[in-house]
Image: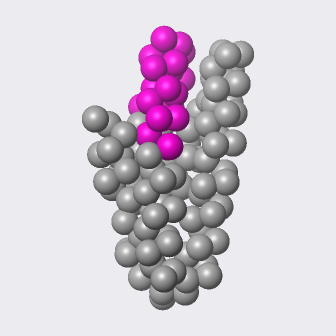
Amino acid sequence: MASSSAADEVNLEQLAEMVSYDLATLQDLVETFLGDTPLLIAAMQTGYEQHNQAELVRNAHTLKSSSRLFQMEQFARQCQALEGAAHAEDWPLVATLLQQLGQDYQAIAAALTIKLTQLMA
């Protein structure tokens, strides 16, 4: 199932190392990702509903970059596929990819929260 593999990618160790194990910074990064991602997905949904290619591409690109910071390559590839579908104005594919992205985000958010809690303990 895609959701579990997307969540399985969540690994905060490398990001913790990048911030020299500054747990406050790590917590801020995770909380920012968790706060911003639903807004980006909602903006993409609005872009889809309005067939606004630029809105979809911009937000998919932003989420792709954020996902790569967390080294969640599968999720980043989903964002990239969404970007491509929006460029091609393949609205049925955009709808499918958006639904999958939302489901995978829920699994990722849960995994990030658990792993952050474990690191903070």
Residue 101 within the segment the image draws in magenta: yes
Q: In this view, does 96 lie to the left or right of 51?
A: left
Query: x and y percent of residue 11 in the render?
Result: 37, 65
Query: x and y percent of residue 40 in the render?
Result: 65, 41
| Main secondary structure along the magenta-highlighted residues | helix
Q: In which quarter of the image is residue 60?
A: top right
Total numbered labels placed on residues in the image: 0
Observer able to see residue 77: no
Observer able to see residue 71: yes
Q: Is residue 99 left or right of residue 59?
A: left
Q: In this view, does 33 lie above or below 1?
A: below
Q: In this view, does 114 lie above or below 93?
A: below
Query: Residue at point 61% right, 47% down?
Result: 37
Query: Coloured how?
Result: one colour
Query: Residue at point 51% right, 52% down?
Result: 109
Q: Quadrant of residue 26?
A: bottom right
Q: Quadrant of the image for the N terminus?
A: top left
Residue 114 within the segment the image draws in magenta: no
Q: Give the range drawn in magenta.
A: 81-106
Q: Is residue 2 left or right of residue 85?
A: left
Query: x and y percent of residue 102 in the render?
Result: 52, 35
Query: Residue at point 38% right, 59% down?
Result: 10
Q: Is residue 67 above or below residue 11?
A: above
Query: Residue at point 49% right, 70% down?
Result: 116
Query: x and y percent of residue 105 in the render?
Result: 49, 43
